[in-house]
Amino acid sequence: MSIAKFIRSKWSKGYGPKSGVRIGTTGVGVKADHYTADGKNFVTKLTLGTGAVMPAVTGSIGVGLLVYTFPAGVHSLKVARIAVAFTAADGNIDADVPLVGLGDLIASGAVTVLNGTAGFDNILTEQSMDDCSGTVEDKSIVVPTAGHIVNEAAGRKGVYLNTAKDWAGAEAALPISGEIWLEWTHLYGV
């Protein structure tokens, strides 16, 4: 079931996490709403608000922000969607067109693309933003790797919103707004 169909379905109305159900945690400036009817299959809506800020950018660099951490145990991630915008605080990179994606590793180092390092965009492959002045990039994708990622109990649990570019100027902070949706199944806990 697609995320849109799920949200419109009776399955999601009035339901939330059941008692004892393990759900994940959010990063700074991120609010999570979890939809579930059975405590096993989830659609998680992450809202990026005040405090959701990428680290400083300048030159050729990749940076990221932890937006969600899956609970302990094994889970399968099926679908991811982003509808996010960057709004440069200092205005030095308003016209820049960075790449953005979701990965289970935080982007770092002197990189200008995300797809050159395993883990930087393995959840949602890199997408070109229109600018850094508030235009929303909206993209949904069935997660690569045969339609889902199975994350073992000892696997990486973080979900990072990553970006990379050869930035035109320097920005002390890069505020982010918008939503990220994840459709996932908690297969079993620890």
Image: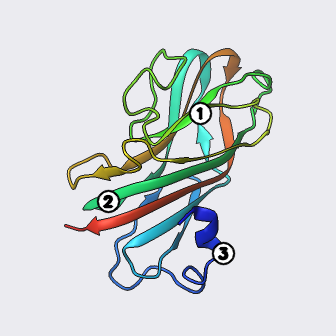
> Residue at 61% of width from left, 23% of height from top?
57
Identify the secondary structure beneath mark 2: strand
Q: Which quadrant holds the C terminus?
A: bottom left
Identity, as a three-letter code, of the amino acid under mark 3: Arg
The amino acid pointed to by label 1 is Val
Q: Is residue 185 above or below residue 149?
A: below
Name the spot of residue 97 as percent of width and height, x first.
71, 24
Query: Circle 3 is placed at which residue position?
Result: 8
Q: Residue at x 45, y 43 (%)?
A: 123
> Height in image: 162 above or below 29?
above
- Pointers 3 and 2 in contact (CB under 8 A)? no
Q: Secondary structure at mark 3?
A: helix
Q: Position of residue 60 (x, y in %)?
A: 56, 13
Residue placed most toward the observer, 135 or 126: 126
| Quadrant assignment, res 185 | bottom left
Can residue 27 be seen in the rendering of this structure? no
- Contact? badges 1 and 3 (CB < 8 Å): no
C-alpha gap between disc 2 and disc 1 = 24 Å
Residue located beneath label 1 in the image: 100
Q: Residue at x 37, y 45 (%)?
A: 146
118 w.r.t. 186: above or below: above
18, above or below 53, in the image: below
User: How many numbered marks are there?
Assistant: 3
Amino acid type at image mark 2: His
- Which badge, 3 or 2, comes first in the chain's sequence? 3
Q: Is residue 97 left or right of residue 3?
A: right
- Residue under numbered circle 2: 75
The disc, 2 or 1, on the residue closer to the chain's N-terminal end is 2
Crowdedness near tag 3: few (<14), some (14–19) or many (≥20) residues, C-alpha within 10 Å: few
